[in-house]
Amino acid sequence: MTDVAAAATKRRAPRNQWWDVWDQFKTHKGALVGLAVFFSILALILIGPWFWTQDPGYVNLRSRNQGFSALHPFGTDQLGRDMLARIMAGGKVSISVGLTAMLLSITLGTTIGVLAGYFKRLENLLMRGTDLFLALPLLPLLLLMVTLFREPLSRTFGPETGIFILIVTAIGATSWMQSARIVRGSVLAVKEAEFVLAARSIGTPPRRMITRHILPNVMSPIMVSATLGIASAIITESALSFLGLGFPPDFPTWGRLLFDAVDAMQLYPARVILPGVMISLTVLSVNYIGDGLRDALDPRIRGR
Amino acid sequence: MFDHAPSQKTLVEVDGLKLYFPITAGLFRRRVGDVKAVDGVSFNIYQGETLGLVGESGCGKSTCGRALLRLYNVTDGSIRIGGVDIARLSADALRRMRPTMQMVFQDPQASLNPRMTVAGIIGEPLDEHTTLSRAEKLARIYELMDAVGLSRDFANRYPHAFSGGQRQRIGIARALALNPRFIVCDEPIAALDVSIQAQVVNLLEELQDRLGLTYLFISHDLSMVRHIADRVAVMYLGKIVELATREALYERPMHPYTQALLSAVPEPDPVHEASRRRIILTGDVPSPANPPQGCNFCTRCPKVMDICRRVEPASRELEPGRFVACHLYETATTAGATAAENGSGKTRLSTNNPTTQQGV
């Protein structure tokens, strides 16, 4: 009898809600496939170089522009560099730039959006600032940032890390405005909900009001703009590399590979398709993961 | 009810409470006027009683209830709860006062965060105001769930999984978590089925008996207020027009607005229902941004006099514990007995319920 009672109490103890989230996430087939694809891409670019030991920067002019072969499964580029090794190396940069820039822009956008939506006094200042950023011509701004900060950053952090920081900051600082506006709109709606009033009558201070009540309820739009943000960060990075503003020309990124191959696209279409497919797969899988997460985080959808 | 009122200890004293929402216009958002949602309201609530606050939609009852808990910053007046004037309290001091006063909200769907479990919702006040350990908190949450008649198994569920009545119980449990002395019930039954309304009201009454709670019960449901309230205040356009004990108000309404309001209540007895004569008010409630000069009710009052359009009637105590703001009873101060007789005579005409006159 006591055992039964003990078991009953145990069952009733609040379960960590992340288990519920995972249970719901598992029911979303697209999200599971997306997760699998994303993890295989990660495995390819992280574990792959351990098995495929060719140097992505090794130039061998005698074997340039080769097709698929056992020696070079994805062929070689116009300088005879192995495409598989370059895709692995490029993926590492592209995905880390994408993820970090997205994190930065979402953090910035959410912070500004929440502050502007919740605190009426800050709204004007922050939203006019957002408008200002939206009105800025982005490419000249990026150009300016790169020319101003490339040298000092390279000197302090080394050429690769320096450029990485520069690119991530540049992309993050110029792409947070959309999410800030979306988040502010959602916060304005949630703020008027009666449960926020109820929390005020309890005496919840603003910072916990935001973390406990506002943020969880504006999660969906944040999630959506985060997943879309990864895609646009990868693409912006490739555009920057193409303009010569990003990583140095011999440094492989997916965007770089793509633009290197565009010149000879009609002769060697595989060199465009391969990095293109990698970018698309990453973006698509991240979108599906975001979709599944958004559903799983909503208790109203959960358990249906 | 009548006799205990003056002798009892006062818990809430509201004096001249005003709450204006500014109307701004133009490029520089200049203040061009005010919506006078609550315009000079004064009343007391005694320890352990239920004060009903009734009135039609938009008359400011909910705003008044929220202002009482300082959910809005009041424009003027004082609100003393347990002797502390909370109308001018700093944010920090107000936060420390919060446990004594809580609120039950109108819409049980909207007043619960859809992303929190029941345990999280009921436990929020405990997180904010106590330093209990996790296990103690859980024990208190279970205790509260038992008190409002929710199964402990529901602790992990989310609000969307409950019916309206159950959600309202969650809201009540949350309000009770910190052992408050005063609870504002802001139309807690308006969004519920009639059968569930009775359950929730009975729960509120039972909790009041058990925990010695004091309620301000805001409602537009006159029969429910008659059931639960000890005293009733009638609001019209931001002002209290009549405040009396339940029996006195329902048997012998004095203010013309109260008479009209009560005449709209259907009678369960078909014999009485057939003879019920409704006072139909014409026109709409004036805008609270631009209330009429003089008495607020003068545009619709069936007994309007010349003075009503010019002079605003003051609230006077016509009988012990009975306040009416109407020029009809102005003479009562000089010749009390005759005026009161006169007043009830007028009432008799409209209510058609003369047999109960002696009951008061």
Image (spheres, coloured by chain):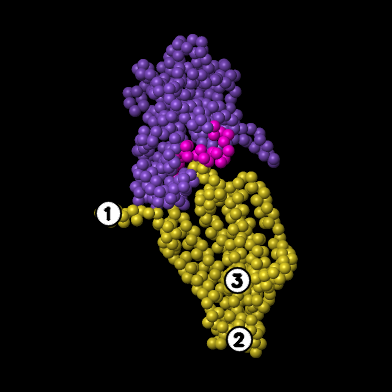
- B88 in magenta: yes
Range of magenta residues = B85-110
Front-lying residue, B233 or A301: B233
Percent x, y of residue A49: 55, 79
Chain bearing tag 1 is: A
Percent x, y of residue A188: 57, 47
Question: Residue A94, which numbered label?
Answer: 3
In the rendered image, which quarter is residue A21 located in? bottom left
Point out the tag, 1 or 2, that comes first from the N-terminus: 1
Chain bearing tag 3 is: A
User: Is residue B219 something that shows in the picture?
Assistant: no
Rendered residue at 51%/53% (across/down): A216
Q: Do marks 1 and 2 share a chain?
A: yes
- Which residue corresponds to mark 2? A66
How many angstroms separate mark 3 from mark 2 (CA)? 25 Å
Rendered residue at 47%/17% (across/down): B318
- Which residue corresponds to mark 1? A2
Q: Colour of chain B?
A: purple
Rendered residue at 35%/44% (across/down): B146
Q: Is residue B18 left or right of residue B242?
A: right
Percent x, y of residue A221: 54, 56
- Above or below B185: residue A46: below
**The residue under label 1 is which amino acid type?**
Thr
Chain bearing tag 2 is: A
- Above or below B95: residue A167: below
Q: Chain coloured yellow: which letter?
A: A
Q: Is residue A281 left or right of residue B177?
A: right
How many angstroms separate mark 1 from mark 3 (CA)? 58 Å
